[in-house]
């Protein structure tokens, strides 16, 4: 830790005082002492009151990412080990850990770091300079903590290829980062360096015994996850409970003797579609604009023995849904799981229009007394705004909605009740659609 101290302006630091983890560049009055970006600094209010410490990066608008609120804390190897172990113990208590998010950045008090576990492979995304420097130590701790519970990790893959890395002054990195060097060797002996172009020191992964396609099982559904080419870290683990809710709903519908026809929009690798298929749906159509996603979804259907009932089509959902409405199509269950329509606060109004239109179309395609699931993964489309948009869509579609459930992200993506940056982003509704009669 450096000897430097960051002094906040008078009246600033409100988010930190409310429990947040970020300090922006315009909140800082001055920096006392010499410091290199990426190092830890002490943070004080304008009057000298100690507020804790975090790592600094003056290339980023988020200049300080807080590591601790305790001004006396020593951020050393023991400190990091405790944070990692606490994150794992939490997951063991709340969720199936065969495949889950093990570290979720600020919500696990390791800001800027995401680690997903797919069976015996870890996939890491590092988004901040300070945590990037701590990454080798944290990952070693995680491998050791998991080994203590009999979970042996064979490889770590880097997916730090998000554009936001550039804003931190970091290169975008993607590739094999670590392979288990075997018993009797150190963690460091398995370490590699992922590169910007996706290559690594293990240029030929096949010769290293690593296949980036990993089979996982979630809610009884098998998936082939591609950690190298899939979106984000390869799979969207945050919808685990929501997918199970849809599987259970379809199962109950079938138990009541209903014929169940499902439309799954923005299906990606087919997760909601496959859960509905496993729940007993008679037919499921999944739509996605990505050729790769449709190919992966089709493979996943075959992996689960559902190819006869669960099929996928490459299509622009926004263009196809009006055509289905004009053709008079109706489905018993319609699911909307679109990508985030906005990733910035200043485009929320534009995003509201997009969410409103897609929800109108989804509701129109749902039969009377059928079921409609809709969600938003945009952090800036907050609960109140999203709920307002759905209500507006229902009025425009001339239907009434009977709410069945409101859900958020799975428990391995914890929501820390404090600052705005601490994790709440996924909103998920299940409704029954009733025509106005």
Image: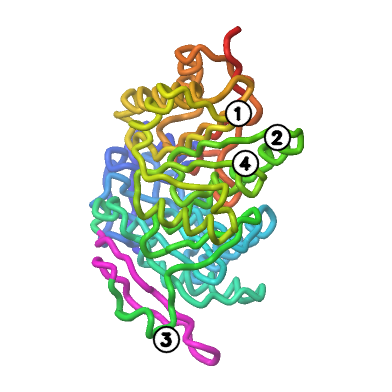
Q: Is residue 161 magenta?
A: no
Residue drawn at x 32%, y 42% is 24
* Vertical comparison of 392 with 135: above or below: above
Q: CA distance from mark 2 to mark 1?
A: 10 Å
From the top left corner, tell me how far across and down residue 107 is, in percent.
Answer: 52, 49
Range of magenta residues: 170-198
- Which quadrant does the C terminus fall into? top right
Q: Is residue 32 visible?
A: no
Disc number at residue 282? 4
Mark 2 / mark 4, whichever is N-terminal: 2
Asked if the residue at tag 2 contacts the one at tag 3, i.e. Cβ–Cβ closer than 8 Å, the answer is no
The residue wearing badge 3 is 189
Point out the residue furthest to the right here.
256
Q: Is residue 140 visible?
A: yes
Residue drawn at x 41%, y 27% is 358
Q: CA distance from mark 1 to mark 3?
A: 53 Å
The residue wearing badge 2 is 253
Asked if the residue at tag 1 contacts the one at tag 2, i.e. Cβ–Cβ closer than 8 Å, the answer is yes
Q: CA distance from mark 2 to mark 4?
A: 11 Å
Mark 4 / mark 1, whichever is N-terminal: 4
The residue wearing badge 1 is 371
* Vertical comparison of 414 with 262: above or below: below
**Prevalent SS, magenta region:** loop
From the top left corner, tell me how far across and down residue 305 is, in percent.
Answer: 59, 58
From the top left corner, tell me how far across and down residue 394 is, in percent.
Answer: 50, 16
């Amino acid at each position: 830790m450096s000897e430097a101290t960051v002094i906040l302006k008078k009246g600033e630091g409100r988010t930190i005082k409310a429990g947040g983890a970020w300090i922006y560049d315009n909140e800082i009055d001055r920096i006392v002492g010499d410091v290199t970006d990426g190092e830890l600094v002490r943070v004080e209010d304008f009057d000298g009151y100690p507020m804790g410490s975090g790592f600094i990066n003056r290339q980023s608008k988020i200049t300080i990412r807080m590591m601790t609120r305790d001004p006396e804390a020593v951020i050393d190897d023991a400190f990091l080990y405790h944070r990692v172990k606490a994150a794992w113990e939490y997951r063991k208590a709340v969720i199936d850990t065969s495949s889950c998010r093990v570290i979720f950045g600020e919500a696990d008090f390791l800001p800027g770091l995401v680690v997903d576990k797919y069976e015996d492979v870890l996939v890491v995304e590092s988004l901040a300079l300070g945590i990037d420097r701590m990454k080798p130590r944290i990952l070693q701790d995680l491998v050791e903590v998991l080994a203590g519970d009999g979970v042996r990790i064979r490889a770590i893959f880097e997916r730090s290829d998000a554009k936001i890395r550039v804003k931190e002054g970091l290169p975008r990195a993607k590739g094999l980062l670590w392979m288990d060097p075997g018993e009797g060797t150190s963690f460091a002996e398995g370490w590699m360096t992922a590169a910007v172009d996706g290559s690594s020191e293990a240029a030929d992964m096949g010769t290293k015994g690593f296949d980036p396609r990993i089979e996982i099982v979630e809610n009884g559904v098998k998936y082939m996850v591609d950690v190298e080419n899939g979106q984000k870290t390869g799979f969207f683990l945050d919808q685990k409970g929501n997918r199970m809710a849809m599987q259970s709903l379809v199962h109950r519908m079938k138990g009541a003797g209903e014929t169940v026809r499902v439309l799954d929009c923005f299906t990606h690798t087919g997760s909601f579609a496959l859960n509905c298929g496993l729940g007993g749906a008679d037919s499921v159509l999944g739509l996605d604009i990505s050729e790769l996603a449709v190919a992966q979804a089709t493979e996943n259907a075959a992996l689960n023995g559902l190819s006869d009932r669960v099929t996928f089509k490459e299509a622009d959902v926004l263009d196809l849904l009006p055509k289905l409405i004009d053709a008079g199509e109706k489905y018993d269950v319609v699911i909307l799981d679109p990508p985030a329509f906005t990733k910035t606060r200043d485009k929320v109004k534009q995003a509201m229009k997009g969410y409103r239109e897609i929800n109108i179309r989804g509701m129109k395609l749902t039969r009377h007394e059928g079921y409609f699931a809709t969600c938003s993964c945009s952090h800036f489309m907050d609960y109140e705004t999203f709920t307002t948009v759905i209500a507006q869509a229902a009025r425009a579609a001339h239907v009434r909605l009977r709410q069945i459930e409101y859900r958020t992200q799975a428990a391995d993506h914890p929501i820390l009740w404090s600052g705005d940056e601490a994790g709440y982003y996924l909103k998920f509704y299940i409704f029954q659609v009733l025509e106005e009669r």
